[in-house]
Image: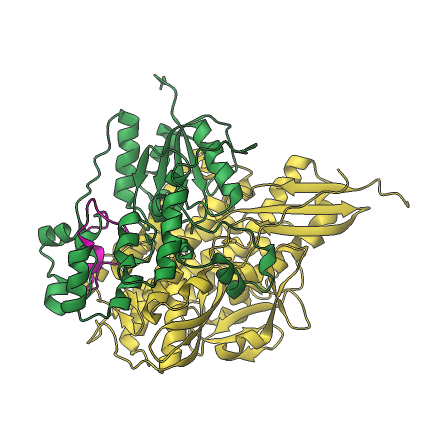
Chain colours: A green, B yellow
Amino acid sequence: MPRRRRRPKLAVWKFASCDGCQLTLLDCEDELLLMSELFEIAYFLEASSAVVRGPYDLSLVEGSITTAEEVERIHAIRRQSRILVAMGACATAGGIQALRNFVDVEDMKRVVYASPEYVRTLEHSLPASAYVPVDYELPGCPPNKVQVLEFLTAFLQGRRPSIPTHSVCLDCKRQGIVCVMVAEGIPCLGPVTRTGCGALCPRYRRGCYGCFGPMESPNTESLSAWFLIRSGLAPQQLVPLYRSFNAAAPAFVEASQRYADPKSVQKAAESLGTHAFDQREPANGEA
Amino acid sequence: MARHEHQRTIRISALARVEGEGALFIRVRDGQPMDVRLQIYEPPRFFEALLRGRPHTDAPDITARICGICPVAYQMSACNALENLFGITIPQEIRQLRLLLYYAEWIQSHTLHVVMLHAPDFLGVDNVVQMAQTNRDLVQRALQLKKAGNQLLALIGGREIHPVNIRVGGFYSVPRPAELRKLRDPLQRGLETALALARWVAGFPFPDFEPKYEFVALRHPTEYAILDGHVVSSYGVDLPVSRFEELVVEHQVPHSTALHYEIAGRGSYLTGPLARFNLNFSQLSPLAQEVARETGHVPPLQNPFRSIVVRCLEIIHALEQSLALIERYEPPARPWVDYEVRSGIGFGASEAPRGLLYHRYEVGADGSIRDARIVPPTAQNQKRIEDDLRLLAPSVIQLPKDRATRFCEHVIRNYDPCISCATHFLRLDIVDEHS
C-alpha cells in the first residue's frame, strides 16, 4: 500500500509512576497492531527495544517530576516533541507520591530507608505542566482506554479530541445509579470529580475517590458540608479524602486545606507557588 | 598478567521491555566478573511513609498504585495483612471470588510478559509488532487471551488497572452468576491459545544454564498457592507469613544499588513462577501438569530461561481453575464481612505474578496506619538476577557488544522484573574508573 504521508512518530516516556498509564496502551488488545501501523512507535521502552531518535510528533508522558534528573529530562523531551501530552494522575497532578508535598520529605526518607542520605529526590512531586508547557492532559488513575484512543484518533485526524469534562455525579444520574451518598450516607467525591471512569465506584456501591481529579469549578465547600452533616465525618477525616491520587491538584489542595493542620497547608502552598512554569534550560538533557 | 589488559565493561543504560526503569553495569577483569550491578533509577515514591496516618481502609487502593501491572497482588496482600490483624475470617464464597480475580491478573500479566516482553528475546526481534510479522495468528490469539483475562479482571474488580472493588473484609459488590458465565467462551478459547503458546515456547532454544537456586514461595495445603499460604523454601524452610522477616535480611549497601534481600546466612534466593513450579508442582491443574510433562518440564527445573514455559503453564492453570470457579460460582450472601478495628500488627502475603509479595501493617486503635512494610518480589529477586549475570559474565564478555547487551537483557527479563514495584530501589551513579 503506497503511503501517502509519513507516519507520525510516537514516543512514550516514563517518570515517577506505576507503569499503569503505559499499560493502558498495551491493554488496547484490539487496536494495538493497528496502532503500530498508523504510528511509528519511535520510543516506548516498556514495549520495544528499538529506539528511534527524535524529534517526535507526539510524546505521551506518564509519571510525575520528582528528581532533578527528571526536571532535565522533561525539558529535553519538550524540546524534541511537537505535541506533548501528560497522561494520568501523576503527570497531570503529581500522583499519590505528591502526598510528600504536605510534609517534610526528609522525614519520609527516614521512614523508608536506613541510609536516607543516599536518596536524592525533590521536595515536591509535581505534574509535567509545572516545568514545561503541556499541550493536552488526559486525567485519571489510570486514564480511560477509550479516552486515550479518542485522543490518538483525533491526533491522526488533526481535530480536537472530544473528551468530556463534566462530573462523575452526572454520569450516575444518566446511568440511573442510586446515589450512594443520598441512599447510604457513603462519602462520595462524585460531585466534584471529573468524569472518565463511567461512575465506576458508585456502580460498585462505593463512594468515588476522585481518581480523575477535580472537574472544572468544583464546589468542594458545599460537598464538604454534606460530608460533615450527612455522612457524619469528623473534619479531619475529610483531609485524606481530598488528598489521594490527585492530592496536589489545586482544587483538592484548597479543599483539604480547610480541615488540615497549618504546617501541611503552608508546605502545599509553596509547591503550588514556586514551581509554576519553571522554564530554566537544563544543562545537557538526554532523550 | 599483572596488568589488567583484559578488562571490559558492559553498560546498558536503559533496559527495554521491563516494567519500570533500570540499567545494568558489568565489569569483568581477566575473565573474572569484578562488578555486576543492576541499577534501578526508578525514583523513590515513599509508599510506606505516605501510608502513615492514613485510614487502614486506604491500604488496598494506595498500595495498588505501586504497580499498574499487578495491582490485585498489592490489594490482596494488603487485605490479607489487615484481615490477619483484625481476626477476620473470609467466607468461602468471597475467598473464591478473590481467587478468580487474582487468576485474572495472572492471566493478563503473564500473557503480557510471555508474548509482548519475553518471546521477542528468543526470536531475536525488538518487539511484539515485529514478532507479529512472522507469527501474526498466534500474536492475535495471544492478545485475545490477554483480553479475556482483563475482561474477567474488569468484571470483578471494576477495571483492569487499579480495580476499585476490593476492600478489607471482601468486596464492595459482587457479580451476578450470569455476568461471569458470559466470560466462559473467551476464557475457553484462551485456554486453547495458552496450550498452543506453551507448546510453542517450549520449543525455543534455551541456553544451557542451571544455577543452584534457593526457591522461595508460598504453599497452601490444598491449592497451588496464590492468594495465601505459608512461606516455604527449597532448603526446607517452612514458616508462617508472620515470621517472613526473620527469614530474609535486608540491606542497603553504600556503593551498591539498593536494598537487597538475602536469606540469612545463605545468600540470594529466587521467588516467582520458577519457585512456585518447583515447590508446588503437584498442585498445578491436571492440564497444566500434563502439558508440563509432555514438553519435558518437570521439577527440578533450574534453568531460568525456561521460566517462559512455566508462565504459560501457570496461565493454563489459572484458566482451568477460573473456568471451574465460574461453573460453581454462588454469590456470597453479603459482599463483605463486618469487623472490629483493633490495634496491633498484621502480616499478609500472596503470590504476585512475579513472586512473593509481603505486607506488614501496624494499626492504631483509631484504625489509622502507624507503620507499613512492603517487600515486593522484584526487590527480592534483584540480588539473584545479579548473581545469574555474575555467573554468565565470563561468557557474555566474549560476545560482540550488541549481542552481549541483548543477552544480558534476556537474563534480566527471565525474572519479569517489575521495577516500579521495587519501591526500595535507589539510583546510583556509576563512575567507570578505567574508561
When asked about the image quadrant of residue B335, the answer is bottom left
Instruction: Look at the magenta stretch and give its main secondary structure.
Output: loop
Is residue A209 highlighted in magenta? Answer: yes
Where residue B397 appears, as percent x and y from the top left, is: 73, 43
Q: How many marks?
A: 0
Where residue B428 appears, as percent x and y from the top left, is: 62, 49
Q: Residue at the spot x=23%, y=50% of the render?
A: A197
Q: Does B20 sit above or below residue B286?
A: above
Is residue A55 highlighted in magenta? Answer: no
Residue A231 appears in the figure: yes
- Provide the residue span drawn in magenta: A195-220
Q: Nearer the viewer, residue B367 or B276?
A: B367
Q: Nearer the viewer, residue A169 or A106?
A: A106
Residue B209 appears in the figure: no
Where residue B161 appears, as percent x and y from the top left, is: 34, 53
When asked about the image quadrant of residue B232, the answer is bottom right
Q: Residue at the spot x=25%, y=56% of the render?
A: A255
> Could you tell me which quadrant the N terminus of chain A lies in?
top left
Where residue A185 appears, as percent x and y from the top left, is: 15, 68
Q: Does B240 sit above or below residue A213?
A: below
